């Protein structure tokens, strides 16, 4: 039997054997009577971008916070680089939805802030911050303050700060939700370049099926009530054909349709 690309995207995920950076093992979390996560298990391959995709309320942010060590699970454990998570740690950096920048500090200080908290000397932290300011496309804005920047630029500051602390796991909670479509697309390209060049593990919450299929090595499709991993999909998009061709390619559109079919019942 010949498998379609869509079928093989789903099958590949099952036969995957890889170096796992983050492993979620039997994690449950209740908020009072609300079962936000129920016995969830999920692995995140090292050096890859995994999206958490699913309808509102399926526990994506909760899972991200538990991985970050900002929230305790009721049952189960999180293993990062082979060790159980007991709280926040330097191997993970969180990029918040609202970017969480210091309004009174320049771009340079904001980006270097994580290193400042760790006691890294000023010249060393500014060298490092300068590299990531450049990598996220903000060269020339080192002295600007958050209120002088657009939403997209502030988001880049948040990302540069997360990159500069040398965490090998980056947790991004809907980083593209507050920006216009054009900025979002540019940012997706930059993110893909970072994934290719940085050998870091990216865990990325999104509501957008198209974005998940375009950007991800792996998509964990979560469904609610009770929240669970419905499917793991590896899109295997050939990015060499260029953005515009990808967005029209039948294999890309097939995966988008198949995910939409799974989600439809929960959003109508
Ligand atoms: N602090 C809290 N107290 C009570 N209930 C909460 C709390 N945080 C989240 N919840 C509930 O837990 C469930 C999962 O929430 P969570 O924010 O993790 O979902 P999500 O998939 O990230 O949602 P969204 O896509 O809307 O951001 C939801 O039903 C939410 O209302």
Image: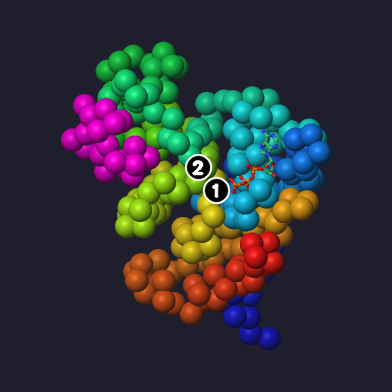
Residue at 31 percent across and 21 percent down: it is 105
Residue that appears at 39% across and 28% down: 101
Query: Residue 142 lies in magenta, yes or no?
Result: yes
Q: Is mark 1 within 8 Å of ligand 1?
A: yes
* Residues drawn in magenta: 134-155
The answer to whether one can see residue 10 in this image is no
Residue 95 rendering spot, x and y as whole percentages:
47, 36
Q: Residues within 10 Å of mark 2 (few under 14, many from 20)?
A: many
Quarter containing the N terminus: bottom right
Q: Tell whether circle 2 marks a residue whose Cβ is less than 8 angstroms from ligand 1.
A: no
Q: Is-magenta flag for residue 236?
A: no
Label whose residue precedes the other's in the sequence (2 or 1): 2
The residue labelled by disc 1 is 205
Residue drawn at point x = 65 percent, y = 65 percent: 268
Q: Is residue 169 left or right of residue 2?
A: left
Taking depth in this image into account, of 16 and 219 the one nearest to the observer is: 219
Q: 29 or 48: which is nearer to us?
A: 29
> Please, what secondary structure does the residue beneath circle 1 have?
strand
Pointer 2 with pointer 1, Cβ within 8 A: yes
Ligand 1 occupies quarter: top right
Instruction: Quadrant for residue 83, please give it.
Output: top right
- Looking at this view, name the residue that lies furthest to the front: 268
Judge from the rendering whether residue 73 lies leftward or rightward of residue 252; answer left or right: right
* Mark drawn on residue 172: 2
Which secondary structure lies at badge 2?
A: strand
The answer to whether residue 234 is seen in the rendering is yes
Cα distance in 3D space between marks 2 and 1: 6 Å
């Amino acid at each position: 039997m010949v498998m379609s690309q869509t079928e093989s995207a789903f099958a590949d995920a099952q036969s995957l054997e890889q170096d796992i950076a983050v492993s979620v093992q039997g994690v449950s979390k209740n908020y009072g009577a609300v079962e936000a996560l129920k016995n969830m298990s999920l692995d995140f391959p090292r050096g890859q971008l995994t999206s958490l995709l699913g309808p509102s309320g399926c526990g994506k942010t909760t899972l991200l916070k538990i991985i970050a060590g900002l929230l305790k699970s009721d049952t189960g454990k999180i293993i990062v680089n082979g060790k159980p998570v007991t709280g926040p740690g330097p191997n993970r950096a969180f990029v918040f939805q609202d970017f969480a920048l210091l309004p009174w500090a320049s771009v340079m200080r904001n980006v270097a802030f994580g290193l400042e908290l760790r006691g890294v000397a000023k010249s060393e932290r500014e060298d490092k911050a300068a590299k990531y300011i450049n990598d996220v496309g903000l060269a020339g804005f080192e002295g600007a303050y958050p209120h002088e920047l657009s939403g997209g630029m502030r988001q880049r500051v948040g990302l540069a700060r997360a990159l500069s602390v040398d965490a090998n796991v980056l947790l991004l909670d809907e980083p593209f939700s507050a920006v216009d479509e054009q900025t979002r697309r540019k940012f997706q390209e930059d993110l893909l370049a970072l994934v290719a060049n940085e050998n870091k593990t990216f865990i990325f919450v999104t509501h957008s099926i198209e974005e998940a299929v375009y950007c991800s090595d792996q998509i964990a499709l979560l469904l609610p009530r009770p929240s669970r991993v419905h499917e793991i999909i590896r899109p295997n998009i050939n990015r060499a054909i260029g953005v515009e061709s990808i967005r029209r390619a039948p294999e890309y559109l097939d995966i988008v349709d198949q995910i939409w079919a799974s989600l439809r019942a929960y959003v109508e």
